[in-house]
């Protein structure tokens, strides 16, 4: 190119080159731990779905029995074994009151009455009994959290902190308790106490905290030799202050996760005991009692078993989804770097 030639620039020469291999640094806002936790939890769709389902079930368990015109144990043999019938769904062929090709409401001359979940063999409203029975499951869930935190967490923290002979004796006690089947303990409780929710709570107090104590002990063994613990000891802090003020806040997230995972196990235990006749006695209602009663008529009226079983499954799955979301939200390694 000669020196006399002019260089002509085009407009495209001044546009930025779009290259996929170029990366621009991203500056992240410095958020607090709890703000990051909330952001990660909201981003987990499974956890949000589980939380919404739990809230809906709690609302129905509280409100439905209060507004229902029927009684929990109100027998009405003229309305026995009626299939589900819902006004705004019957025109779609869903929950229209038909069973075996017949309109059972017309056959039994039932007018202007709708049973959303149908009735059982005694003519009792399954909608009312289902949500009343769900209250027992929610009570067991709340009891499981309290027992895990009050007994299991404290037991595991003390065992792991002191170690030595104290830890050995406490762990042998755990192994002895864990070796006794839950069904045997429940049977012994029925011999001492009357059937009901009280024996189930005693079973939870005796065996439901084992898993939590082991998690708390493992976390304590991992943290008790850290520098901040040694600094507290040097400054003269008491053992209880170190356990509950210094170490507990650092492992509280893992303990919350473990308690959430223990809820479905506690609910399933109560349902199983009620199903085999060792839990809530009839005519009182729980999901286990309803499944047991409906199982006898499963071939003729499967909805009597399927509906409470579905509510139980949704409740347990929702707690598992929420617990899994909490696990990911509490884990700082999930934060995008």
Image (cartoon, rainbow, N blue to C red):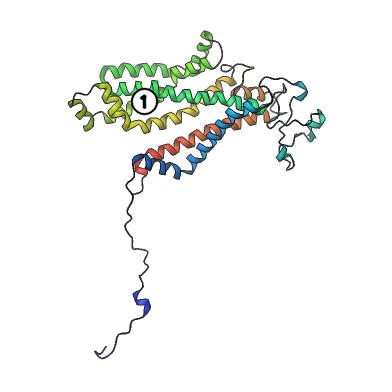
Could you tell whether 97 is left or right of 147 in the image? right
Could you tell whether 198 is left or right of 331 in the image? right
**Residue 313 location, x and y as percent?**
56, 32
**Neighbour tally class for label 1: few under 14, some 14-19, many 20 plus, Cα within 10 Å:** many
**Residue 119 location, x and y as percent?**
71, 27
Secondary element at image label 1:
helix
**Residue 247 location, x and y as percent?**
29, 29
Query: For the N terminus, which image quadrant?
Result: bottom left
**Residue 84 location, x and y as percent?**
71, 33
Residue at 53%, 11% (x, y): give it: 190
Residue assigned mark 1: 214
Residue 259, quarter of the rendered image: top left
Residue 307, quarter of the rendered image: top right
Asked if residue 48 is positioned above or below residue 266 in the image, the reply reads below
For the view shown, which residue lies furthest in the left direction?
234
Q: Which residue is more in the foreground, 245 or 149?
A: 245
Residue at 52%, 40% (x, y): give it: 49
Asked if residue 188 is positioned above or below residue 1 in the image, the reply reads above
Q: Which residue is more in the foreground, 161 or 72?
A: 72
Q: Which residue is more in the foreground, 177 or 20?
A: 20
Residue at 41%, 41% (x, y): give it: 38
Residue 208, quarter of the rendered image: top left
For the view shown, which residue lies furthest in the top direction?
192
Q: How many numbered markers are drawn?
A: 1
Could you tell whether 185 is left or right of 312 in the image? left
């Amino acid at each position: 190119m000669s020196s006399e030639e002019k260089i002509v620039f085009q407009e495209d020469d001044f546009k930025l080159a779009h290259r996929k291999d170029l990366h621009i640094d991203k500056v992240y806002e410095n958020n607090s731990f709890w703000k990051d936790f909330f952001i990660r939890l909201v981003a987990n769709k499974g956890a949000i779905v589980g939380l919404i389902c739990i809230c809906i079930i709690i609302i129905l368990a509280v409100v439905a029995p209060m507004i229902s015109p029927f009684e929990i144990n109100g027998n009405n043999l003229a309305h026995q074994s009626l299939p589900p019938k819902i006004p705004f769904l019957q025109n779609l062929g869903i929950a229209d009151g038909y069973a075996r090709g017949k309109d059972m409401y017309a056959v039994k001359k039932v007018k202007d009455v709708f049973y959303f979940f149908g009735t059982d063999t005694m003519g009792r409203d399954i909608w009312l009994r289902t949500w009343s029975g769900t209250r027992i499951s929610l009570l067991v869930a709340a009891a499981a959290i309290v027992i895990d935190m009050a007994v299991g967490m404290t037991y595991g923290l003390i065992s792991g902190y002191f170690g030595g002979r104290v830890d050995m004796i406490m762990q042998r006690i755990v192994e002895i308790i864990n070796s006794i089947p839950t069904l045997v303990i429940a049977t012994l409780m029925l011999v001492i106490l009357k059937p009901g929710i009280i024996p189930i709570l005693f079973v939870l107090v005796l065996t439901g905290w084992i898993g939590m104590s082991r998690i708390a002990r493992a976390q304590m063994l991992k943290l008790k030799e850290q520098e901040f613990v040694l600094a507290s000891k040097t400054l003269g802090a008491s053992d209880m202050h170190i356990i509950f003020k210094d170490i507990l806040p650092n492992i509280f997230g893992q303990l919350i996760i473990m308690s959430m995972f223990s809820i479905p196990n506690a609910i399933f235990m109560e349902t199983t005991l009620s199903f085999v006749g060792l839990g809530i006695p009839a005519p009182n209602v729980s999901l286990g009692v309803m499944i047991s009663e409906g199982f006898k008529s499963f071939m003729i009226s499967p909805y009597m078993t399927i509906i409470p079983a579905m509510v139980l499954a949704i409740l347990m799955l929702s707690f598992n989804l929420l617990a899994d979301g909490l696990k990911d939200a509490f884990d700082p390694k999930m934060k995008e770097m």
